[in-house]
Amino acid sequence: MTLRHIRLELARTPEFPEGSHERGYEFQAPLTAEGHLDVDAFRAERAGCTVRRFWPGEEERLGTLHHTRNHAWVFSYAPGEEDDEAFYKLDRHLFRVGEYVTIREPEGHSHTFRVTSVR
């Protein structure tokens, strides 16, 4: 299974009516032919499933993709769950250009991101 490089950029918000290409994530993950995260391939490729969070005014964060015991997908930057950023209802969403996904920050704030590339 080949890992795909996926870029997410902040979608439209009241603060950013056009969205923001300066705020988002780039990560590597295995996808099914339909565009869902592939759990079985993830188990075999876990070490290569990395993430980079970029946001102006904040230090770039590097971490990994995790599939939790509760069947949720999260980005994690340090051991433990305190810093995990969880995908919202990812089983309903696809990683295809133009699709949207929501990620919840550890503090509880949620942001919607648009998939801008899948390579």
Image (cartoon, helix red, strand yellow):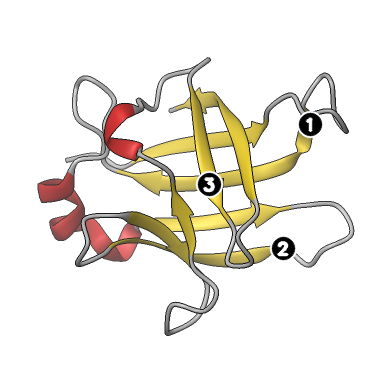
- Residue type for callout 1: Ser
Mark 1 vs 2, N-terminal side: 1
- Residue type for callout 2: Glu
* Whether residue 59 is situated above or below residue 93 in the rendered picture: below
Q: In the image as oriented, which residue stretches furthest toward the front?
A: 108
**80 lies left or right of 112:** left
The residue nearer to you, when weighing 28 against 74, is: 74
The residue nearer to you, when weighing 61 against 15, is: 15
* Foreground label between 1 and 2: 1
* Foreground label between 2 and 3: 3
Q: Is mark 2 on a helix, strand or loop?
A: loop
* Whether residue 94 is situated above or below residue 76 in the rendered picture: above
Counting from the top left corner in percent of width and height, residue 25 is at 59, 46
In what quadrant of the picture does the C terminus appear?
top left
**114 lies left or right of 20:** left
The image's mark for residue 87 is none
Q: State how far apart marks 2 and 3 are (Cα).
A: 17 Å
- Dot 3 corresponds to which residue? 103
Counting from the top left corner in percent of width and height, residue 107 is at 64, 66
The residue nearer to you, when weighing 30 against 16, is: 16
Residue drawn at the location 63% of the way across and 55% of the way down: 53
Asked if disc 2 and disc 3 are in contact, CB closer than 8 Å, the reply is no
Q: How many labels does the image show?
A: 3
The image's mark for residue 60 is 2
* Foreground label between 1 and 3: 3
